[in-house]
């Protein structure tokens, strides 16, 4: 089943009266500005993104500014937003564009898809919203609207269901006002056809929506098959110098918090103590309450171990991997959210 002929027209009429038109990235919607917003909006709500986007664009107003910055600074401006691979890919893509095409974001779908971090929906959003090209999109909001409208069974993460949703999206996308249409269907999913309690009485598509007709709005789209998240436990060493500086290490480029700065991490207290012994650290550790941080695929249980040094220790510094960090005096570093929270607690306890 394809959408009714007036599907797009109903959405556009609703958008003219109720759509969002004052979002920061809608002002001067250049390909670069739209690209940054689309990457930030992946798996993150608009209200969370807005302040991050504004600070990010103030510091990196152009693609050249982003490409010329250090990864540390980019990650610093991303700190707290999560899913840090997005920031690393954004920075890497900016450098590739600067070196290959003089700083202009490609305006062909096939070329955009070659860049790290840009998939089919993100590429379609950039080209439709910034360049008025006709391309379908399929972010989480659009999936929800289309799955309900067609009463499509099955988790959208499954290949066959995703293929069907793309078919619906392609068929519904009009040839005119495509930028407004794509913004409209995203807005509808974000403000009316929401996850928990959709406001069907305010929806311009209600008369044609199968889920509404069947009273199955809250059951669709089908949820991801539930599974118990595994738990991984680590110990983190909060090593504090007499000058109230904290020792941080740079994490590997890949993996969780890739490229960010964090406390030395150990699998257990024995490994932590062995590292302290090798570094001639004799001060006793104060064990803080456990901190749980949840990722999409596992829980991370962090046991912070705070060691306040009586004398400076230089042996813990490893080549280009460690810094003594003081919030008010150190340069901009990318810090994961739980690391930032522990640093704040340290500052408050001093």
Image (cartoon, rainbow, N blue to C red):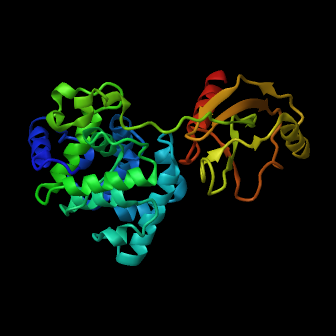
Instruction: Please name the residue shown 66% across and 55% down the image.
Output: 252
Q: Report the number of discs.
A: 0
In-front residue for pair 330/53: 53
Percent position of residue 134, x then y: 20, 62
In-front residue for pair 139/48: 139
Percent position of residue 334, x then y: 55, 47
In the displayed orientation, state which residue is furthest to the bottom: 100
Q: Quadrant of the C terminus?
A: top right
Judge whether residue 343 can be spotted in this image: no
Percent position of residue 316, x then y: 80, 48
In-front residue for pair 232/32: 232
Would residue 36 be found to the left or right of residue 200 on screen?
Answer: right
In-front residue for pair 154/180: 154
Percent position of residue 328, x then y: 56, 38
Instruction: Please name the residue shown 33% across and 61% down the image.
Output: 123
Judge whether residue 146 can be spotted in this image: yes
Would residue 49 be found to the left or right of residue 130 on screen?
Answer: right
Instruction: Please name the residue shown 40% across and 60% down the image.
Output: 119
**Residue 141 position (above or below residue 167):** above
Would residue 336 be found to the left or right of residue 13 on screen?
Answer: right
Residue 143 placement: quadrant: top left
**Residue 336 position (above or below residue 109):** above
Residue 131 placement: quadrant: bottom left
């Amino acid at each position: 089943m394809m959408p009714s002929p007036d599907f797009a027209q109903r959405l556009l009429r609703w958008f003219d009266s109720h759509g969002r038109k004052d979002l920061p990235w809608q002002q001067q919607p250049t390909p670069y500005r739209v690209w940054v917003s689309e990457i930030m909006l992946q798996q993150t709500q608009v209200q969370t993104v807005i302040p991050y986007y504004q600070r990010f664009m103030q510091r990196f107003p152009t693609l050249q500014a982003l490409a010329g910055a250090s990864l540390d600074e980019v990650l610093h401006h991303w700190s707290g937003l999560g899913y840090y691979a997005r920031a690393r890919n954004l920075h890497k893509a900016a450098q590739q564009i600067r070196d290959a095409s003089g700083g202009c974001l490609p305006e062909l779908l096939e070329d955009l898809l070659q860049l790290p971090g840009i998939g089919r929906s993100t590429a379609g959003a950039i080209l439709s919203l910034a360049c008025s090209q006709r391309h379908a999109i399929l972010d989480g909001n659009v999936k929800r609207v289309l799955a309900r409208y067609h009463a499509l069974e099955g988790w959208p993460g499954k290949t066959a269901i995703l293929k069907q949703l793309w078919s619906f999206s392609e068929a519904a996308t009009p040839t005119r006002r495509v930028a407004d249409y794509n913004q409209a269907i995203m807005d509808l999913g974000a403000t009316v056809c929401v996850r928990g309690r959709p406001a069907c009485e305010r929806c311009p598509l209600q008369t044609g929506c199968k889920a509404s007709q069947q009273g199955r709005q809250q059951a669709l789209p089908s949820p991801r098959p539930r599974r118990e998240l595994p738990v991984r436990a680590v110990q983190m060493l909060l090593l504090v110098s007499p000058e109230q500086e904290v020792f941080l290490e740079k994490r590997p480029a890949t993996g969780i918090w890739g490229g960010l700065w964090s406390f030395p991490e150990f699998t257990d207290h024995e490994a932590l103590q062995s590292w302290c012994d090798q570094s001639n650290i004799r001060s006793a550790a104060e064990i803080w309450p456990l901190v749980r941080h949840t990722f999409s695929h596992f829980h991370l249980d962090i046991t912070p171990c705070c060691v306040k040094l009586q004398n400076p220790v230089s042996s813990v510094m490893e080549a280009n991997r460690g810094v003594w960090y003081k919030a008010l005096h150190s340069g901009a570093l990318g810090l994961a959210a739980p690391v930032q929270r522990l640093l704040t607690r340290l500052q408050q306890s001093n």
